[in-house]
Amino acid sequence: MHVIVGVGGGIAAYKVCSVIRHFTEAGHDVRVMPTRSALNFVGAATFEALSGNPVTTEVFDDVDEVAHVALGRQADLVVIAPATADLMARAAAGRADDLLTASLLTARCPVMFVPAMHTEMWEHPATVANVATLRAHGSTVLTPASGRLTGADTGAGRLPEPTEIGLLGDLLLTRPDALPYDLSGVRVLISAGGTREALDPVRYLGNHSSGKQGYALARVAAQRGATVTLVSGAVSEPGAPAALDIVHVDSAVELSSEMNARAADSDVIIMAAAVADFRPVGVAGAKIKKGAEGPAPIALTTNPDILAGLVRSRTAAQIPSSTVIVGFAAETGDADGGVLDHGRAKLRRKGCDVLVVNAVGDGRAFGTADNSGWLLRADGTETGLPYGSKTLMASRILDEVAALVPDR
Ligand code: CTP
């Protein structure tokens, strides 16, 4: 596919080299369009070497090819990173004073702006208005991360990590309408990853959850405008998604208390974590030694069922009745029934509004980037989720959530 990477004149331009690589390694034809000021940060030769294509900033180079029309029209995705305040102002106004902005006017594919600037510039009413205009034009404008900016500053305005830009770009290539800004004002609480149940100061009982699905949900919900809190157990997912709060936990009991503490202030609760059903009865204060008599049996006790507990709290009016509660079920199927039979039984048992069922085993679901499954609703209706990335799954699950959240 054809991807245009537009580069604005900001210090974060150097990070975009990894984004260009991401798309070329996926086999896409990448055209890099820097603004004139971007070339103060990274030279054209770098962009040409990484993309394998010529790089120019001007409409008046290669006039015979009418590059801005040809490249804009054939693009399947435009990613603009870093999207500076000036570049977004020009794009919002429909200016066409360089090859990138001219190409934006001819492109009919998804356009994703990835802003990076100082917090004051991001929060300035002029930038806020330009972002709203770009969204109204149908473009995606990512919410930047908070954190260390150039120099000693910290605040909102950091470029999201290149891996995250790549994942969201891939999502728009597979599903052009996957990132509508439709969850603004919705508070979403998501659990992700696996719990660790301590045996002693150095050992624990854990599981293979990578956290990928929960992180993908958090990432997509935040970029659809939701206020997201992610309560994360152990994960192998690198890098935190931009634009959300993360709370780290270890055990099921800690996860339970963090989820319950936040439940009443959430419009949507998604339990994507792989919670240990059992924990050791006691945690040894010192490292357990091998000893001469061989291993001692580990006595286990049952952990709280967090999802079922949240549904009970809703029934008891401790959290608003309008709260949408989503659960997950990873099933293998067995002598008692197939994956879907177990999923249906679990939906009834847990009492949530939506249950996302994945088939696991044989290397499926855990730790993989791709997945398939079903969405089972409390009203008995069911939808298949076709095979695709966990980011794509997240976008489909959040479509369901968006339809269930009461009008705001
Ligand atoms: N879950 C939970 N608390 C637990 C166990 C699971 O909140 N103690 C949640 C998971 O986050 C998931 C859903 O319940 O959203 C289903 O998890 P799963 O492990 O498949 O279900 P179990 O209740 O453990 O059922 P079973 O062991 O019978 O498959």
Image: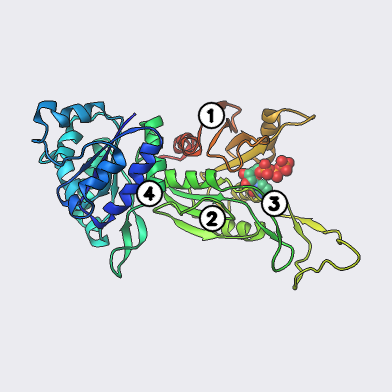
Q: Which mark is residue 162?
A: 4
Q: Are marks 4 and 2 in contact (CB under 8 Å)?
A: no
Q: In this view, does 282 lie to the left or right of 371?
A: right
3D distance between C-alphas at marks 3 and 2: 15 Å
- Disc 3 residue: CB within 8 Å of ligand 1: yes
Residue under label 1, please give it: 385
3D distance between C-alphas at marks 2 and 1: 25 Å
Mark toward the start of the polypeptide (3 vs 2):
2
Mark toward the start of the polypeptide (4 vs 1):
4
Amino acid at the residue labelled 2: Val
Amino acid at the residue labelled 3: Ala
What is the crowding at mark 2: few (fewer than 14 residues within 10 Å), some, or many (at least 20)? many
Residue under label 3, please give it: 276
Q: In this picture, is 348 found above or below 323?
A: above
Q: Residue at the spot x=61%, y=47% of the render? A: 209
Pinpoint residue 255: horizontal percent, then vertical percent.
Answer: 61, 57
Q: Is mark 4 on a helix, strand or loop?
A: helix
